[in-house]
Amino acid sequence: MITQLQVRRKAFAETRTVSIEIPVLADGEVLLAIDKFAMTANNVSYALSGDMIGYWKFFPAEEPWGLAPVWGFADVVECRCDDLPVGERVWGFLPMASHLVVSPTRVTGRSFTDGAPHRADLPGIYNTYQRTRGDPAALTALEDERCLLFPLFSTSYVLYDYLVDNAFFGAEQVLVGSASSKTGLGLANLLSRHGEGRPQVVGLTSPGNVAFVNRLGTCDEVVVYGDIPELDPAIPTAFVDMSGNGEVVSRIHDRFGSQLKLSCAVGATHWGTGRFRPDTSSTPHSFFFAPAQFAKRDTDWGPGEILRRAQTESARMAADLKGLVEIRHERGAEAVASAWRSLVDNAIAPDIAIMAALD
């Protein structure tokens, strides 16, 4: 049987556990047994933007339910594809489930693409699975971190590259909203290491997360949301927001006005708050879609180069976080559902990370 933890699309704190028969594989199909996957605020963001961007389409479920995507490891347990032997271990985009059927295409020694028809028009970066048998020992030792941090840190890297690619939009400081989030702290880490012309890095966070962000040592200044009115409005500023808190975004726009050179939304760690919908603003608050920058750099640098650089930096930052983040393992549908609700309620501390398995 396949066990799935499904999420109600319009009220995704609500879940249900569903069991379905494992289908008979068609020629070319492979059955993956999902060993473990990460659960982060990023996955809640996938659910939040599931209709707008199409995240519900990756792993279809009967409406009003959906399967929120996660990043994890799976093993080939049944195969009708000559290129992927039983026992092969892969890493990639998975559902919150015990198994997944894929249709491998473009198979190389390092990766393959799921060629299932319903995924054909979805961003390729999410359809590609890494074959891990040739991974170096140092990467194999980071399996949990690869699930928990690499997808978020890869987004951090693409955000950083987007800022660099556009000369920081003329900004002299970058405000990182929800600086305690993994994507936020990854961006701050990368910005802190930038060479000549580096803008100031200002981390915005809640009072309870100030100590954690300060311990990271990557922000020039850490500011609680309530102190936004004390920021200097004359400084040309780029705002990269991981929180999705409409009130915070509004206050940033009101504070900086025309000196706000960029305002972009990346995630929604505070998904339950109102969204920002300005009547008038000299700078639009736009959604940052990482696959678009990946695609641009594939053209600029050659296919796969930006992903290679992003994963190299992800491994470095994961090593930097050793000892600063505690990884907790949840197993079984009930425990995983409880952890999901905690994520939705924003009730998991920034120094806690969750790995999960349904079976």
Image (cartoon, rainbow, N blue to C red):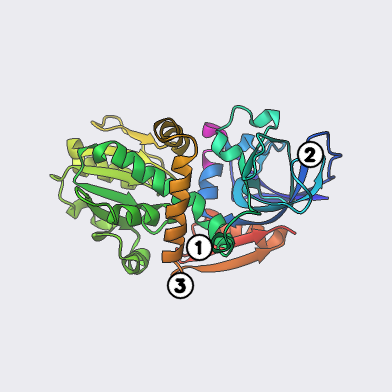
Name the disc covering residue 323, or none.
Answer: 3
Determine the main secondary structure of the stretch shown in magenta.
helix
- The mark lying in front, picked from 3 and 2, is 2
- Is 30 on the left or on the right of 331, as rendered? right
Q: Hey, which quadrant is residue 114 in on the image?
A: top right
- Is 303 on the left or on the right of 135, as rendered? left
Residue at x 45%, y 65% (from the top left corner): 319
- Magenta-tinted stretch: 48-54
Residue 167, image x, y percentages: 24, 38
Which amino acid lies under the numbered mark 3 shown in the image of this protein? Gly
Which amino acid lies under the numbered mark 1 shown in the image of this protein? Ile
Q: Secondary structure at mark 3?
A: loop
Q: Which residue is mark 1?
A: 348
99 and 281: which one is in front?
Answer: 99
Q: Hey, which quadrant is residue 277 in on the image?
A: top left
Name the disc covering residue 81, or none.
Answer: 2
- 10 Å crowding of disc 3: few (<14), some (14-19), many (20+): few
